[in-house]
Image (cartoon, rainbow, N blue to C red):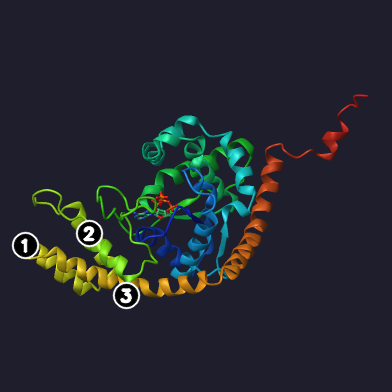
């Protein structure tokens, strides 16, 4: 049984892009793998945030994940900052990471552009913390969307470098690529759907009227109709393929090819099917959010299970990197007085 690790940031409401790109495959992988899923609050601190809001977002993220089918009994579900070993391993990996490999990261460049007023070192070091997350659990399989492949490559490089410098310790984590295409922002289909960009996403826990209105306002054609399908319409088809029956998709594809497609009809159908598909997630989410004490207990239990694995790895890492004072080494030091 392979150890799987993946994480999600509590930077806002989880959306259908997160579901199709990540959570859906997490749920499926639980059946045959030993899964560790983390709510990565330390990563969420790399962009401006409200400290009073963060704990609420963490609980809402946990409730949404459970609502989607993550089973906290079967999988380890916990909050990253509750396991201190993440930051310790992160520091050690910092010291073997070439600066140039961080500056080349596409996500760093994008986020630095998005948050020009706050380009902090955490944003640059983000992929090192991600590598620490994965290696701490000696995960061999990491479900990632296409946008995270570059970061995972760094984790693999760091595992190799650590093993070379300090002796065989970490397996090289392999990507488990999710099938879904990238879901694009509804209000700007040239960018990806993101929790931190209002109007870009449909939250997994959105009420029906909000789903309706977001889909109705989705950008379709921005200029005159060309030969190729516009990014906005292609994005609506991606969503339709994920939430509607195959015959519904076929019906709208034929209409598109024949030039008879009315976007209003496509949007209406998509909103209806999405509402139906998301209803059980929303229901379970609301139920869990009404009992925050229970959610906190679930996460505390998860942290306990995660800590047990993390501690063992760090004992090995400390010994290999020279951070343990051997009794024999101490006895060879001459007394100073
Ligand atoms: N639009 C997307 N399409 C497909 N997959 C997506 N993912 C995110 N957006 C899309 C996948 O969701 C997982 C968790 O992502 P994350 O929360 O750790 O960070 P992110 O990729 O930065 O997600 P957001 O929504 O864009 O958050 P913000 O706005 O905070 O940056 C990842 O596996 C990702 O591939």
Answer with mark 1 or mark 3, whichever residue precedes in sequence: 1
Residue position marked by numbered label 2 in the rendering? 217
Q: Can you see residue 229?
A: yes
Say which quarter of the image contains residue 239: bottom left
Q: Which image quarter holds the C terminus?
A: top right
Toward the viewer: 109 or 208?
208
Identify the residue shown where x is 47% and y is 36%: 124
Q: Is mark 2 within 8 Å of ligand 1?
A: no
In this rendering, the answer to whether 230 lies above or below 304 is above
Q: How far apart are the two marked residues, 1 and 3, measured between alpha carbons? A: 28 Å
Answer with mark 2 or mark 3, whichever residue precedes in sequence: 2
**Left or right of residue 286, residue 328 in this image:** right
The image shows residue 229 at horizontal and vertical percentages of 15, 54
| Disc nearest the viewer among 2 and 3 | 2
Res. 276 mark: 3
The image shows residue 94 at horizontal and vertical percentages of 57, 36
Q: Is mark 3 within 8 Å of ligand 1?
A: no
Residue position marked by numbered label 1 in the rendering? 259
Q: Which image quarter holds the N terminus?
A: bottom right
Secondary element at tag 2: loop
Answer with mark 2 or mark 1, whichever residue precedes in sequence: 2
Toward the viewer: 119 or 291?
291
Q: Residues within 10 Å of mark 1 (few under 14, many from 20)?
A: few
| Disc nearest the viewer among 2 and 1 | 2
Q: Can you see residue 3?
A: no
Identify the residue shown where x is 23% and y is 61%: 236
In this rendering, the answer to whether 64 lies above or below 177 is below
The image shows residue 14 at horizontal and vertical percentages of 41, 60
Secondary element at tag 1: loop
Secondary element at tag 3: helix
């Amino acid at each position: 049984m392979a150890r799987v690790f993946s994480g999600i940031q509590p930077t806002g409401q989880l959306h259908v892009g997160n579901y199709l790109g990540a959570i859906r495959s997490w749920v499926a992988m639980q059946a045959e793998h030993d899964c560790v899923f983390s709510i990565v609050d330390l990563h969420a601190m790399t962009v401006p945030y409200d400290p009073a809001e963060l704990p609420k977002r963490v609980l809402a993220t946990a409730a949404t994940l459970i609502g989607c089918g993550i089973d906290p009994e079967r999988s380890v579900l916990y909050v990253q900052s509750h396991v201190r070993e993440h930051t310790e391993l992160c520091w050690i990996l910092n010291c073997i990471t070439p600066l140039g490999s961080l500056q080349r990261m596409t996500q760093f460049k994008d986020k630095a552009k998005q948050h020009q007023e706050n380009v902090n070192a955490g944003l640059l070091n983000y992929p090192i913390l991600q590598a620490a997350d994965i290696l701490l659990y000696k995960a061999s399989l990491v479900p990632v969307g296409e946008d995270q492949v570059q970061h995972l490559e760094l984790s693999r490089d760091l595992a190799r470098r650590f093993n070379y410098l300090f002796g065989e310790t970490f397996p090289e984590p392999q990507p488990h690529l999710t099938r879904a295409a990238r879901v694009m922002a509804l209000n700007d289909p040239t960018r990806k759907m993101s929790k931190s960009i209002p109007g870009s996403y449909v939250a997994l826990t959105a009420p029906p009227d909000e789903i309706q209105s977001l889909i109705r306002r989705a950008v379709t054609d921005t200029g005159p109709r060309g030969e190729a399908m516009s990014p906005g319409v292609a994005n609506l088809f991606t969503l339709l393929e994920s939430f509607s029956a195959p015959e519904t998709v076929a019906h709208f594809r034929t209409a598109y090819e024949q030039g008879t497609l009315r976007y209003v009809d496509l949007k209406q159908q998509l909103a209806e099917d999405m509402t139906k598909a998301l209803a059980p997630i929303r229901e379970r989410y609301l139920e869990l959010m009404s009992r925050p004490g229970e959610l906190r207990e679930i996460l505390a239990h998860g942290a306990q299970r995660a800590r047990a694995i993390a501690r063992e790895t760090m004992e090995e890492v400390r010994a290999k990197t020279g951070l343990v004072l051997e009794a024999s080494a101490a006895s060879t030091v001459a007394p100073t007085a």
